[in-house]
Image: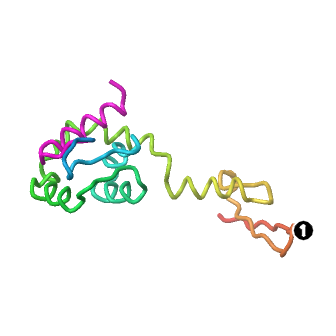
C-alpha cells in the first residue's frame, strides 16, 4: 500500500469511529475533493482539518453535524499514535511547504544580485534603487 493509501486508510478508520464515512451518502459524511486532504489532516491535526476545508480539499453537506459527531466521539483521544505514526511521519516528510523553504525560494527567484540564502559566506543583500538599475551592497555577518 502506498503512503497516500495508508494516510487515507488511517483517516477513514478514524472517522468511522464517529460514524462518518468518506464520500458516503449521509449529509454529515465528508466528501473528499482532493486526495491531499488525508496527508494534510494527519500532518496538521485539527488545524489541518480546518485549513484543508478552507482550501476546498473536502466538503460536507451538513458541516455542523459532521463536527458534532467528531467532537461527540472524542476522536482526538481515540487516535492510536502507533497506528498513525507512519502516515504522520510521511505527511511531514513530503510536505514541502514551510516558511523556511518559502523564504529560500523567494530569495532564489527574486534576488537581483544573484546570491541567495544558501551562500556559505552568510552575506545578506541590500538592494538600492527604484528601477531595474538597482545596485547591491553586501554586509558580512559573523
Q: Residue at x 17, y 53 (%)?
A: 76
The residue lying toward the viewer, choosing from 13 and 128, is 13
Direction from residue 9 to residue 97 in the image, left or right:
right
Classify residue 50 by image quadrant.
Answer: bottom left
Give the position of the N terminus as an image quadrant.
top left
The residue lying toward the viewer, choosing from 66 and 72, is 66
**Residue 67 image point, x, y percent:** 20, 59
Give the position of the C terminus as an image quadrant.
bottom right
Residue at mark 1: 133
Q: Residue at x 41, y 43 (%)?
A: 34
The residue lying toward the viewer, choosing from 88 and 136, is 88
Density class for disc 1 (Cα within 10 Å; few <14, some 14-19, many ≥20) is few
**Figure check: 109 above or below 136:** above
Label 1: which secondary element: loop
The residue lying toward the viewer, choosing from 105 and 2, is 2
Query: Which secondary structure class fits the magenta region best?
Result: helix
**Residue 102 image point, x, y percent:** 57, 56
Q: Residue at x 45, y 45 (%)?
A: 95
Considering every residue shown, the one lying at the far right of the view is 133
Name the colour scheme: rainbow
Q: Residue at x 26, y 48 (%)?
A: 30
**Residue 105 image point, x, y percent:** 63, 53
How many numbered callouts?
1
Residue 16 located within the stretch drawn in magenta: yes
Classify residue 115 by image quadrant.
Answer: bottom right
Residue 55 located within the stretch drawn in magenta: no
Direction from residue 37 to residue 30 in the image, left or right:
left
- Bounds of the magenta span? 1-22
**Residue 61 image point, x, y percent:** 27, 55
Classify residue 135 by image quadrant.
Answer: bottom right
Amino acid at each position: 500500500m502506498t503512503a497516500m493509501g495508508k494516510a487515507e486508510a488511517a483517516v477513514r478508520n478514524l472517522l468511522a469511529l464517529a460514524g462518518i464515512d468518506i464520500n458516503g451518502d449521509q449529509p454529515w459524511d465528508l466528501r473528499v475533493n482532493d486526495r491531499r486532504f488525508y496527508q494534510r489532516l494527519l500532518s496538521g491535526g485539527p488545524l489541518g482539518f480546518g485549513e484543508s476545508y478552507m482550501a476546498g480539499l473536502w466538503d460536507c453537506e451538513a458541516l455542523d453535524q459532521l463536527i458534532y459527531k467528531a467532537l461527540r466521539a472524542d476522536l482526538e483521544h481515540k487516535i492510536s499514535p502507533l497506528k498513525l505514526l507512519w502516515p504522520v511521519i510521511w505527511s511531514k516528510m513530503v510536505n514541502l511547504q514551510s516558511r523556511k523553504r518559502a523564504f529560500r525560494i523567494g530569495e532564489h527567484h527574486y534576488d537581483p544580485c544573484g546570491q541567495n540564502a544558501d551562500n556559505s559566506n552568510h552575506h545578506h543583500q541590500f538592494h538600492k534603487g527604484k528601477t531595474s538599475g538597482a545596485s547591491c551592497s553586501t554586509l558580512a555577518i559573523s
